[in-house]
Amino acid sequence: MSGAALLDSVESHTRLAGHNRVAMLLFRLDGAQLFGINVFKVREVLRKPPLEKLPGMHELLAGSFDYRGKTIPVIDLAVALGYPPLAGVDSAHLVVTEFSRSVQGFLVADFQRIVHCTGESLEAPSSTLGFGGRVSAVTRIDGQLMAVVDVEHVLASIDGAAAEVSHRIQQQAEQQQLSPRRILVVDDSTVARVRIINLFKQMDIECLVAQDGQEALEQLNSMAAGKDEMITVVLSDIEMPRLDGYALTRAIRDTPALRSLKVVLHSSLSGVFNEALVRDVGADRFIAKFQPDLLAKTVLELMAD
């Protein structure tokens, strides 16, 4: 099956979003291990094209190529995950993706098929599996372990620039007397959590942390029961194991004690369907990762409401 044929039905998978289900494109890097990436992030799957190498390239970059009139970087995902490089393998494939408003390609050995996973079936990987921060979740597909690649971690390895809030926004935060100055940050990516926490430290805003929607909901219910001081804003990723951001938002809106919380969905997923689902599940805002000033300004506005 060609890459184009494989992705012809992507639009049909959008109905899964908002129901704690996700469509995963399965692929291999070396040997039998299955990996996955959210199909909504995939634009196209191609045979590996000729790549242009540039002097001083990062070790994870295999080169660049012209994709529909735009030069995009190509990352050797095998190298990023600790496997032998694929840059010189003629049979390799290129998965063109869009993350956080940027387009890039990832080299993979081959692609398999698209499968549907429930949030409940995805779980955080045990450290004993040896994936480190490069994998955000694991599950079983027909009895075989499938690892979901944490693309944010991979991209941060190449461009790890710290997120800085502009002086203007920091001044605005100082002038805005808010209490409590705390938010709940919900994200399964270690890299994303660190970047967000560091961003809000610049504004003297305390961050509570949850690694997925289920953990976040448990924390919020505990706060509502009077066991901890309540927060006013929940900043949540969308893609997460156990309970995704859409399902978390629905649960918040369906719980009387939590209903008044402000919810910002913050994701590397792109696309118009996100905006529609934000309205459907009752979130207050959607912000594509990673826009420090816009994120900071939005949280300040919601805290002041």
Image (cartoon, rainbow, N blue to C red):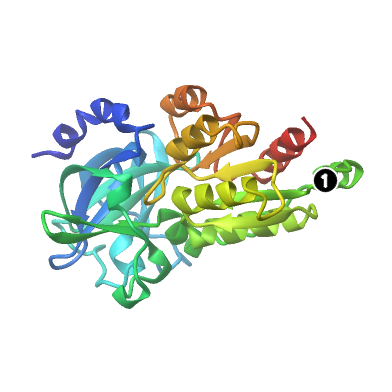
Measured as percent of width and height from the top left, residue 299 is found at 70, 39
Look at the image and tell me whether residue 194 can be seen.
Answer: yes
193 left or right, relative to 112: right
The picture quadrant where one finds residue 296 is: top right
Q: Secondary structure at mark 1?
A: loop
- Give the quarter of the image for residue 177: top right
- Could you say where residue 5 lies in the image, as x and y percent from the top left? 14, 32
Counting from the top left corner in percent of width and height, residue 178 is at 84, 43
Farthest left residue? 1
Does 2 appear above or below 90?
above
The image quarter containing residue 110 is: bottom left
Residue sitting farthest toward the right = 175
Of residues 55 and 36, the one nearer the viewer is 36
State which quarter of the image contains the N terminus: top left
Whether residue 48 is visible, yes or no, is no
Q: How many marks?
A: 1
Between 120 and 293, the one lying in front of the other is 120
Residue placed most toward the observer, 200 or 182:
182
In the image, what residue type sits under mark 1?
Answer: Ser
Position of residue 34 in the picture relative to residue 81 (left or right): left
Q: Name the residue beneath numbered marker 1.
A: 179
Position of residue 200 measured from the top left corner of the image (x, y, whole percent): 72, 53
| Placement of the C terminus among the 4 image quadrants | top right
- Give me the residue at 19% from left, 29% from top: 8
Specify few, some or many for label 1: CA neighbours under 10 Å numbering under 14, 14-19, or 20 or more. few
Q: Residue at the spot x=24%, y=26% of the render?
A: 12
